Image (spheres, grey):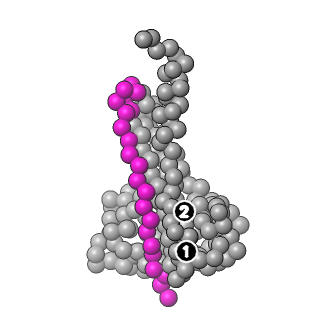
């Protein structure tokens, strides 16, 4: 059986579509009223566990996450300090000192999620020939108890001459307790 160019194109398109990244799904009873009506409720400080500090530095800053790895004797906080019409400011604090502070554009999705429009897609070398595509998505919401919910999805797809392609997807959610 001879495989023509059309069959190869269809196969590549199917391969590309099967690796779309979606965020974790939750029971809607966990979330508070729609964020679109009360963006100011997100403003505040949220306690971060030392193990999660690495992920926050990796996903929300350009710093080397290995240098800022969470240590058990330190206290970490994620602070949301300013929300304008289409931009939000995140500050990451370690022992009350600011490690980084970044502003991100955002959009509201499904009225309950604040979706960050930051570096979503990174391309390394020549995808599927010798290289890969990395897709990251982050969204935030509030739980009914007023705590911050961070949903993260990551999709990595690597390949060598299309024949040896590997990749993985990961999805997780973190809950951060609001500091009073």
Q: Residues within 10 Å of mark 2 (few under 14, many from 20)?
A: many
Report the magenta residues as a range.
159-180
Asked whether disc 1 touches disc 2, contact meaning CB atoms under 8 Å apart, the reply is no
- The numbered dot on residue 136 is none
Measured as percent of width and height from the top left, residue 132 is found at 43, 37
Query: Looking at the picture, how far across and down is residue 158, in whole percent?
Result: 39, 37
What residue is shown at x 44% (from left), y 65% (from top)?
Answer: 173
**Residue furthest out toward the bottom:** 180
Secondary structure beneath disc 1?
A: helix
Name the residue nearer the viewer: 97 or 11: 11
Residue pointed to by mark 2: 139
Direction left: furthest residue: 72
Give the image quarter of residue 95. Answer: bottom left
The residue tagged 1 is 29
Mark 2 residue element? strand
Residue 58 in the image: state x and y as whole percent: 42, 58
Find residue 16 and report its horizontal and vertical position in percent: 50, 36
Task: State whether residue 177 is above or below residue 125.
Answer: below
Q: Nearer the viewer, residue 18 or 64?
A: 18
Q: Which residue is rendered at x = 38% and y = 46% of the image? A: 168
Give the quarter of the image for residue 42. bottom right
What residue lies at 51% left-to-right and 52% top-to-bottom?
22
Q: Is any part of residue 175 visible from this angle?
A: yes
- Asked if 46 appears above or below 173 in the picture, the reply is below
In depth, the one of 78 and 138 nearer the eye is 138
Q: Which residue is outermost to the front? A: 1
Residue 110 highlighted magenta (yes or no): no
Crowd tier of the residue under label 1, counting other residues whose Cα lies within 10 Å: few below 14, some 14–19, many 20 or above: few
């Amino acid at each position: 059986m001879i495989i023509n160019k059309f069959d190869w194109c269809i196969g590549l398109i199917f391969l590309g579509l099967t690796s779309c990244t979606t965020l974790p799904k939750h029971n809607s009873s966990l979330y508070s009223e729609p964020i679109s009506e009360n963006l100011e409720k997100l403003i505040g400080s949220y306690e971060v566990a030392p193990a999660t500090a690495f992920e926050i530095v990796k996903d929300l800053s350009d710093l080397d996450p290995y240098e800022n790895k969470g240590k058990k004797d330190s206290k970490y906080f994620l602070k949301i300090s300013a929300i304008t019409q289409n931009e939000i400011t995140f500050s990451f604090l370690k022992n009350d000192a600011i490690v980084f502070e970044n502003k991100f554009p955002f959009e509201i999705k499904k009225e309950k999620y604040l979706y960050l429009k930051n570096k979503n897609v990174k391309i390394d070398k020549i995808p599927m020939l010798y290289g890969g595509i990395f897709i990251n998505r982050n969204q935030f919401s509030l739980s009914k108890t007023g705590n911050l919910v961070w949903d993260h999805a990551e999709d990595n797809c690597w390949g060598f001459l299309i024949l040896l392609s590997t990749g993985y997807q990961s999805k997780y959610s973190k809950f951060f307790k609001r500091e009073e």
